[in-house]
Image: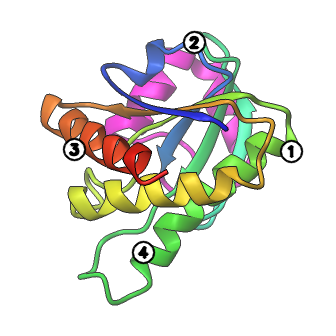
Amino acid sequence: MAILKAFCGDITRLSVDAIVNAANSSLLGGGGVDGAIHRAAGPELLAECAAIGGCPTGEARLTRGYRLPAPHVIHTVGPVWHGGTHGEPVALAACYRNSLQLAQRHGLASLAFPCISTGVYAYPFAPAAALAVATVRQTLVDCPAIGEVTFCCFSAGDFEVYQRLLAADAESR
């Protein structure tokens, strides 16, 4: 059974098999986590992403990590929040599920996820975090190669939410 944990800090400094990028559909960089990952990885990441040709919402693509401690980046495109009635929860769950399945197919054992869609895409944080933990836990049943998943949080408040969710998840097992 995989270890699930929360971390508060810079995802670009984590030494895991892959960090997950909360990308936009062009995969060509942007603000927030996406911009930070592109800056830390260097221009080679942008060139590889340009060759991929984009990524639809909910899907995931794998690239090298270049100058990152993580040898791989999994790019996934989260949904923009439109009140929750336009398929946002389904699309957000697909981001986590497809990222884990992609990691499984490539034999990656450790991943770090940012808080997908909770920045400029405005998905409310608490429901996004709860959905992330539940989806990861459900998906890991079919991903035995993955031994560790880290939820990387930007703020102490976000970290506390994940800590509570993971504690409740562990108690329910």
Give the residue at the far bottom of this rendering.
Answer: 85
Q: Quadrant of residue 25?
A: bottom right
Residue density around tag 1, few if under 14, some if 14–19, many if 20 or more, within 10 Å = few
User: Which three-letter amino acid code belongs to the residue tagged 3?
Assistant: Val
Residue carrying label 3: 161
Front of the two marks 4 and 3: 3
Residue at x 73%, y 34% (from the top left corner): 63
Earlier-in-chain disc, 2 versus 4: 2
Q: Position of residue 84 (x, y in %)?
A: 30, 82
Residue carrying label 2: 15
Label 3, secondary structure: give it: helix
Residue density around tag 2, few if under 14, some if 14–19, many if 20 or more, within 10 Å = some
Q: CA distance from mark 1 to mark 3?
A: 30 Å
Q: Which residues are magenta?
A: 24-53
Earlier-in-chain disc, 1 versus 3: 1
Earlier-in-chain disc, 4 versus 3: 4
Residue carrying label 4: 89
Label 4, secondary structure: give it: helix
Residue at x 70%, y 18% (from the top left corner): 71
Residue carrying label 1: 105
Earlier-in-chain disc, 4 versus 1: 4
